[in-house]
């Protein structure tokens, strides 16, 4: 009898043990394992990306310091004490050297004999910039791309008819595929109707874009008349916005940006590139301008009307701005003025 009970119990225990060994994990147990593995993988990826970004920052900061030192040497070597006009002209024509995976973007401001240099890491799309005698700072220079992939600048999608009615009817369009609208307001006085005119640019280009192809409103203001141009944008949608102005022979222009509370934003990192033209040849008399901290004021040069002035906003302004304002004031003599926009999306 006892023997029979023992055999029964042994058989039962053996069967239960066998079932436990052959049953495997439950679905809940498998889900828990998968979640844990996913969490560990996410932590690993985040940590790796953080290490990669820090390594990229160290690399591009080092490149900027070395390049800035070389540009300073070039200015000393140059008999006029001026910095190179382009990267190809830097380092006595040999160009600046960057580390593998890094690239430079360079803007020279002739009127002030200064520059802004951006270094970008292709691996992490990390950018820093530097000015003469400065330290590397986060983000790209105004007008430079913070991405290793640089998209082309684009003009607004407005039509000739829209521009022709701009004095009375605001234009809703896009620039670089992003929402963009423009309206104007006039002080007491008269002005002609507007039309498209790009011929005053005399072959000048911006990042490969021929300015003569940019749809450009052309307006004539009577003496003492002020025209306000308002360009509304969506904050953070544009990486670059250029304002192109020509024919400022008797015209003073004040430019500023407003945030959603109508507070003026800093203009300290804006870039102004100005070139006067005599016929079709650049001369050495750029338009004078002042940066007042929250506005740029461009002054005319009488009797020289074939100019091309470019004002470039920085990424911080475009991140916070809802409206860009340009105020044109005609001087002692009534004058024509042309203006346009070029932008690059994020």
Image (spheres, rainbow, N blue to C red):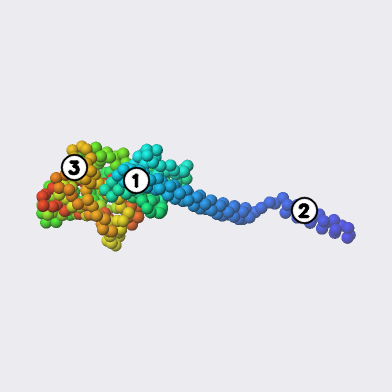
Taking the spot 23% from the left edge, 46% from the top edge, the residue there is: 286
Looking at the rendered image, the disc whose residue lies closer to the viewer, 2 or 1, is 1
Q: Secondary structure at mark 1?
A: helix
Do the numbered discs 2 and 1 sit on residues whose CB atoms are within 8 Å?
no
Q: Position of residue 145 (x, y in %)?
A: 37, 46
Q: Position of residue 80 (x, y in %)?
A: 30, 44
Question: Where residue 8 is drawn, which disc sits there?
Answer: none
Nearer-N-terminus badge (3/2)? 2
Q: CA distance from mark 3 to mark 1?
A: 30 Å
Q: Secondary structure at mark 3?
A: strand
Do the numbered discs 3 and 1 sit on residues whose CB atoms are within 8 Å?
no
Taking the spot 53% from the left edge, 51% from the top edge, the residue there is: 48
Q: Is residue 177 left or right of residue 7?
A: left
The total number of labels drawn is 3
Crowding at mark 3 (Cα within 10 Å: few <14, some 14-19, many 20+): many
Q: Quadrant of the N terminus?
A: bottom right
Q: Is residue 45 above or below residue 92?
A: below
Disc 3: which residue: 306
- In the image, 127 versus 192, the foreground residue is 127
Disc 1: which residue: 75
Nearer-N-terminus badge (3/1)? 1
Taking the spot 88% from the left edge, 60% from the top edge, the residue there is: 2
Disc 2: which residue: 15
Q: CA distance from mark 3 to mark 2?
A: 98 Å
């Amino acid at each position: 009898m006892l023997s029979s009970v023992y055999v029964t119990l042994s058989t039962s225990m053996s069967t239960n043990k066998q079932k436990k060994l052959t049953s495997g994990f439950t679905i809940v147990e498998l889900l828990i394992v998968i979640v844990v593995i996913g969490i560990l993988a996410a932590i690993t990826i985040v940590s790796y990306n953080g290490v990669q970004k820090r390594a990229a920052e160290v690399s591009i900061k080092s490149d900027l310091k070395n390049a800035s030192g070389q540009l300073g040497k070039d200015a000393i070597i140059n008999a006029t004490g001026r910095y190179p006009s382009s990267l190809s002209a830097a380092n006595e024509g040999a160009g600046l050297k960057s580390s593998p995976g890094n690239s430079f973007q360079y803007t020279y401001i002739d009127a002030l004999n200064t520059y802004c240099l951006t270094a970008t890491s292709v691996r992490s799309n990390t950018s820093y910039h530097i000015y003469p005698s400065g330290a590397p700072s986060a983000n790209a220079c105004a007008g430079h791309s913070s991405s290793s992939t640089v998209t082309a600048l684009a003009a607004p999608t407005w039509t000739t008819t829209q521009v022709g009615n701009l004095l009375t009817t605001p234009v809703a369009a896009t620039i670089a595929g992003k929402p963009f609208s423009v309206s104007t307001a006039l002080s007491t006085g008269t002005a002609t109707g507007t039309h498209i005119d790009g011929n005053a640019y005399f072959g000048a280009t911006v990042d490969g874009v021929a300015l003569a192809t940019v749809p450009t409103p052309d307006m004539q203001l009577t003496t003492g008349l002020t025209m306000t141009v308002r360009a509304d944008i969506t904050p953070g949608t544009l990486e670059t916005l250029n304002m192109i102005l020509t024919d400022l022979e008797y015209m003073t222009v004040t430019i500023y940006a407003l945030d959603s509370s109508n507070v003026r934003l800093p203009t300290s990192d804006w870039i102004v590139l100005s070139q006067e033209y005599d016929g079709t040849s650049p001369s050495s008399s750029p338009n004078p301008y002042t940066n007042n901290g929250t506005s740029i004021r461009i002054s005319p040069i009488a009797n020289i009307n074939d100019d091309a002035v470019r004002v470039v906003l920085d990424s911080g302004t475009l991140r916070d701005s809802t409206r860009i304002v340009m105020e044109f004031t005609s001087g002692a003599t009534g004058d024509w003025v042309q203006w346009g926009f070029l932008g690059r999306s994020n």
